[in-house]
Image (cartoon, rainbow, N blue to C red):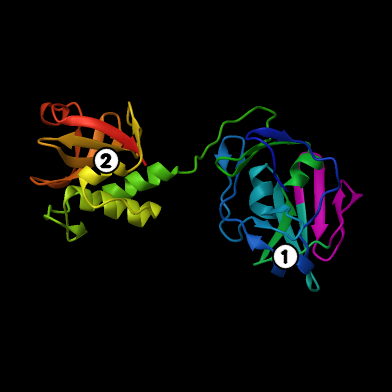
Amino acid sequence: MKFSGKSFVFLFAFVSCTIFSAAHAHAAAPNEGVKIQINDKLVNFPEGQPVVDTHSQLQVPNRPLMESLGYQVSWSQEDREVRVTMKKGDQTLVLKTGDTFILVNGKKVEVNSMIGMEQGSVYIPLRFVSETLGNKVQWDEENQLAIVDADGKYHAPAWYKAKKQDTMLQFAKDYLGVPYKWGGETPVGFDCSGFIRYVFTHNRGIDLPRTSTEMYDSAGVAVAYPSPGDLVFFSKSGTSHVGIYMGDGQFISATSSHGVRIDSLASPYWSNRYIGAKSI
């Protein structure tokens, strides 16, 4: 399925479905960033992962998808081909690798490529869910998440992609407890600006000035209220300390007394020294 448009646009298919072809298997690429959700639950793909074929169609391993939709799935070997039968209520779907059609309650539904396998899994396009089974599919662009409304109701994402600042904050927290070292720029020991430079360089690829004064004077854009991932600055006699705002009034920094730790902007010590924030 080729996705486009804004987040949470209902996708309605108007062309015949395309089954993942063995002829295209080597040209397909794993799409590890895309996740599939049925109603309120993510689909677990223990073996093969969703792939994108040469027609930019999102192809999904058949068994996990169909079982999540309530179908009983069975298969049998027929010479060198695999026959898959899916049953739910009075509906029976049958497909076989090497064929160019699917049987829906005994009626052929033609497809425009040969049904194939990849890494031991038979694949079907997610488009098949909307075109043949009549389920609406929402596409969440931001989270790279396809949501199948199998019950006919709207469903919010069950998973949210980590934002860059969230990833950076977790990266910074991994160094809690690292001792303070004057001039330190490595996990052996950090001073305040050395810690900030290390986090931004290794997590976001951004090279910041060496000192807190230089960061305050020339890096980023000043903001009235900090957001997670922004730098917060403090002064004793001139700019003397810098940290990363974590949200909820907290920030992380390398302190001379306790090393890397999380403190509150509202504490008497830091609130009296706070001079502003900058977004990088």
Dot 1, how many residues are within 10 Å of its Cα: few (below 14), some (14-19), or many (20+)? many
x then y, percent, for residue 224: 33, 26
Measured from the top left, where is residue 212 in percent x and y?
21, 45
Q: Nearer the viewer, residue 39 or 223?
A: 223
Mark 2 or mark 1: which comes first in sequence?
A: 1
Residue 249 in picture, x, y percent from top left: 26, 29
User: Could you say which quadrant of the image residue 257 lies in?
Assistant: top left
User: Looking at the image, which residue is at 10% across and 36% down?
Assistant: 237
Which quadrant, please, contains the C terminus?
top left
Residue 217 circle label: 2
SS state under label 1: strand
Residue beneath the point at 66% across and 66% down: 120
Where in the figure is residue 88, as x and y percent of width and height?
Answer: 75, 42
Q: Is residue 57 above or below residue 152?
A: below
Q: Is residue 175 visible?
A: no
First to last magenta residue range: 86-113
Q: Residue furthest front?
A: 217
> Which disc is residue 117 wearing?
1
Report the magenta stretch's main SS. Answer: strand
Q: Residue at position x 81%, y 56% from top?
A: 95
Q: Which amino acid type is shown beneath numbered disc 2?
A: Asp
Magenta stretch: residue 211 in it?
A: no
Say what amino acid the circle numbered 1 marks: Met
Q: Is residue 82 above or below residue 40?
A: below
- Tell me the crowding category of disc 2: few under 14, some 14 to 19, or many 20 or more residues within 10 angstroms, Cα based: some
241 and 264: which one is in front?
Answer: 241
Quick check: is 98 in the magenta stretch? yes
Q: Quadrant of residue 96?
A: bottom right
Label 2 – label 1 distance at C-alpha: 58 Å
Q: Residue at x 35, y 32 (%)?
A: 227
